[in-house]
Image: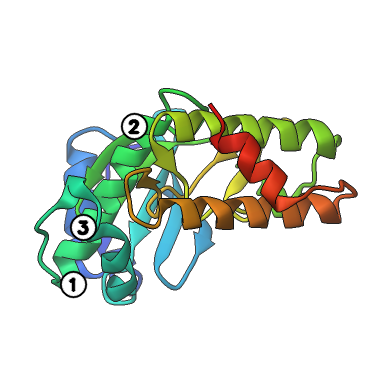
Amino acid sequence: MPKKTKEEWKVYKNVFDSATILNLVKLQSQSHFDGLESPIALGKEANVFTALKGKQRLIVKIYRVENCNFNKMYTYIAPDPRFAGMKKRRRLVIFSWVQREYRNLLKAREVIRVPTPIAVKDNVLLMEFIGRQEPAPLLKDSPPTSAEKFFAKIIDNIKKIYKAGLVHADLSEFNILNFEQEPVFIDWSQATITQHPEAQEFLKRDVKNIVNYFNKQGLKLGEEGVYGQIIKN
């Protein structure tokens, strides 16, 4: 696929603001991808597209600067020592939020399977495509063939990232891919280090969401027991 010129990017002028288009042009000029392919998810705060680099697919996640709830983002980031002293300014908070997702992915991929982050530029994040011809489905849309085995794999992943010093903080069937009966955790912007003052509450919420989902799949799980299993040495 030939690279787009700046003129060709104007087709997206009603989809992205001019700053976002410049970020995409910059990433393209650095040979990270050739061009956008098709949308996967269009949300209030972020849009997710597939992109091509030669015959290889990538994921491009674009945060919508004017739509993002930067106040909520700030409450998650402010206690994170990795972003100490950050001022509460919309663009700065949102760009730090995207940078945070990039850094969380780098850390998480050391211990579990997540989309490998490729590059980041302000409100644009490039990641590995998870899937074959089509993107791997969300767990909510593709229940596992064995709920018990899949649940065990999820808990093992949570344990590994917790031991590595991370809590996902937004884990549910909406943020886990079912890739050929293997869980892949996505959406890492809210993930925080275990030193965060609310890390344990975030972990308990993750556990509650996962337990609720798998109880609906026929398992009989208790939140406290699962939580204890994760935090024990």
**Residue under the point 17% across and 67% down:** 91
Please tell me the numbered disc located at residue 106: 2
Query: Hey, what amino acid is under mark 1?
Result: Arg
- Image marks 1 and 2: residues in contact by CB distance under 8 Å: no
Please tell me the numbered disc located at residue 51: none
Q: Residues within 10 Å of mark 3 (few under 14, many from 20)?
A: some
Furthest residue to the right?
A: 218
In the rendered image of this protein, does residue 74 appear above or below residue 150?
below
Task: Identify the residue position indicated by label 1 in the image.
Answer: 90
| x, y percent for residue 28 | 24, 41
Query: Hey, what amino acid is under mark 3?
Result: Phe
In the rendered image of this protein, does residue 220 appear above or below residue 68?
above
- Label 3 to label 1: alpha-carbon separation: 9 Å
Task: Identify the residue position indicated by label 3 in the image.
Answer: 95
- Image marks 3 and 1: residues in contact by CB distance under 8 Å: no
- Label 1 to label 2: alpha-carbon separation: 25 Å
**Residue under the point 24% across and 48% down:** 99
